[in-house]
Image: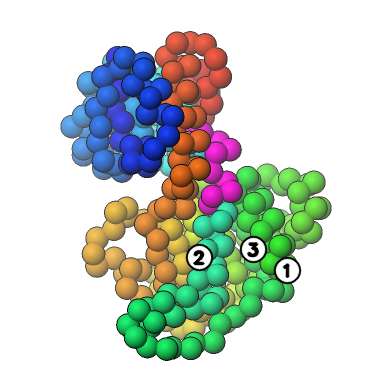
Amino acid sequence: MRILLSTCSYQDTPGPHHDLMESQGWEIVRERGPLPEARMLDLAGDFDAFLCGDDGITRAVIEKSLPRLKIISKYGIGLDKIDIPATKELKVPVLFTPGVNHDTVAEHTFLLLLALAKNFVCAIDGTRAGRWDRKTGTELFAKRIGLIGMGRIGQEVARRARAFGMEVHGFGNYWPAEIAAEFQITRHLSLDSLFDSVDIISPHTNLNAQTLHCINAERLNRLPDGSWVINTGRGELIDQAAIIAALDSGKLAGYAADVLDQEPPPADHPLLHHPKVIITPHVGSRTFESVPRQAMKSLTNLINALKGEGECNCANGVI
């Protein structure tokens, strides 16, 4: 059994997943992802399974991988880099790991939000350079945060927002009524209504044709001047040009994200050097607690699927 392991978090973080994988007797080929489609095409055809991150697994990659490829096991929950319709048509099961990183990502969302509110980067850069720059910050108390997507991560962000005394608004096809009642989340039936009602936008939704660039110029103009956008979802949820224009005009006071449209980004990526932007390198779910949970889930999914027994979280209905 030959397995392609491409997720760096899985490889770099200690935990029980390493011993369990070694005990399977598989041949493990390690690559440093996320791998573009071109590299996946180079590798395709020689593996029984992929244990992948955000690699470019397109229809062409899947077709070239057959008939040998039996399983795609995703480390994480985002499936937008995998051609799911192609996997259904070609009968390749896609496994994923729901419920393993919501606390960690919610914490990172608040790290980014607090860093903007308290001018954290400016303060740290100043003291490290020997300066004493005292830029005035902003309280989170009573600010209005709008959550796009009310799944596990959105719910945990709402929980933390209420602990800060924030007013929470939400929009999503899925609506957790008990959680919404507990944390006094105002429901909106459209994104336009959500943007009309808040100071801060934080998306926690899947990337698909409907959510691509859901944060765009028209919706940003509905926010009050000096608003913030926090993005720990996907880089493509925003219209990048619209974000930059809103930052330059003052409509947005700041943009903070853990994700970009290109990862790793080119050195001249426009969001990396903007003075009102904070970017972290997609580490929101990369903690010593969360990584072993995700790794063990993706690995046990793969083991169970290959054996044809036990639980495996299938995302495309092939199993």
**Left or right: 13, with 237 as reference point:** left
Disc nearer the start of the sequence (3/1): 3
Q: Marks 3/1: CA distance?
A: 14 Å
Viewer-side label of 3, 1: 1
- Residue at the left extreme, as displayed: 42
Q: Marks 1/2: CA distance?
A: 17 Å
Residue that appears at 35% across and 79% down = 128
Task: Give the crowd class for mark 3: few <14, some 14-19, many >=20 residues within 10 Å.
Answer: many
**Nearest the camera: 4 or 286?**
286
Viewer-side label of 2, 3: 2
**Nearest the camera: 306 or 175?**
306
Residue that appears at 63% across and 45% down = 152
Quarter holding the N terminus is: top left
**Which amino acid does the dot numbered 1 rest on?**
Gly
| Span shown in magenta | 96-105
Q: Is residue 100 in the magenta section?
A: yes
Q: Position of residue 80 (x, y in %)?
A: 43, 42
Compared to residue 91, the image places residue 54 above or below, namely below
**Which amino acid does the dot numbered 2 rest on?**
Leu
Magenta stretch secondary structure, dominant: loop
Q: Marks 2/3: CA distance?
A: 15 Å
Report the residue marked by disc 3. 146
Q: Are marks 1 and 2 in contact (CB under 8 Å)?
A: no
Task: Give the crowd class for mark 2: few <14, some 14-19, many >=20 residues within 10 Å.
Answer: many
Disc nearer the start of the sequence (2/3): 2
